[in-house]
Image (tube, rainbow, N blue to C red):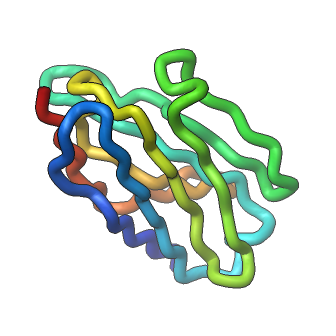
Amino acid sequence: QVQLVESGGGLVQAGGSLRLSCAASTNIFSISTMGWYRQAPGKQRELVATITNGGTTTYADSVKGRFTVSRDNAKNTVYLQMNSLKPEDTAVYYCCLHYLRPYWGQGTQVTVSS
């Protein structure tokens, strides 16, 4: 059974930073691609960033240059460093583990005030 627990969300002013963490309780973490997604009110869930088991990363155009995804396989944890936050980054952020099927965390709220 795969469990993902996100943390690190909160309220921040525009221009500020937050670091999200996602801890996975599974022995397949190190061989899985991990992703961060977000869903704003009234909008569909969208991909923010991914990192493969080999460390290759991809980013949505809207966050390139501001967000950085990383992982620590020894800690079964994936991170999302978010800098230069904008009000439009406000959303619930979800961690996802991709291995044969997607596994989702419960989400963490990020609110950026203007």
27 to the left or right of 88: right
Q: Residue at x 31, y 42 (%)?
A: 16
As drawn, the residue found furthest toward the right would be 54
Is residue 20 placed above or below 50 in the rendered structure? Answer: below
Q: Residue at x 64, y 42 (%)?
A: 50
Q: Residue at x 73, y 83 (%)?
A: 74
107 to the left or right of 59: left
Residue 84, x across and y down, in percent: 40, 33
Residue 4, x across and y down, in percent: 44, 70
| Displayed quadrant of residue 76 | bottom right
As drawn, the residue found furthest toward the top would be 61
Is residue 38 placed above or below 11 in the rendered structure? Answer: above
Is residue 16 placed above or below 66 in the rendered structure? Answer: below
Q: Residue at x 61, y 29 (%)?
A: 59
Residue 31, x across and y down, in percent: 80, 65
51 to the left or right of 89: right
Residue 37, x across and y down, in percent: 44, 40
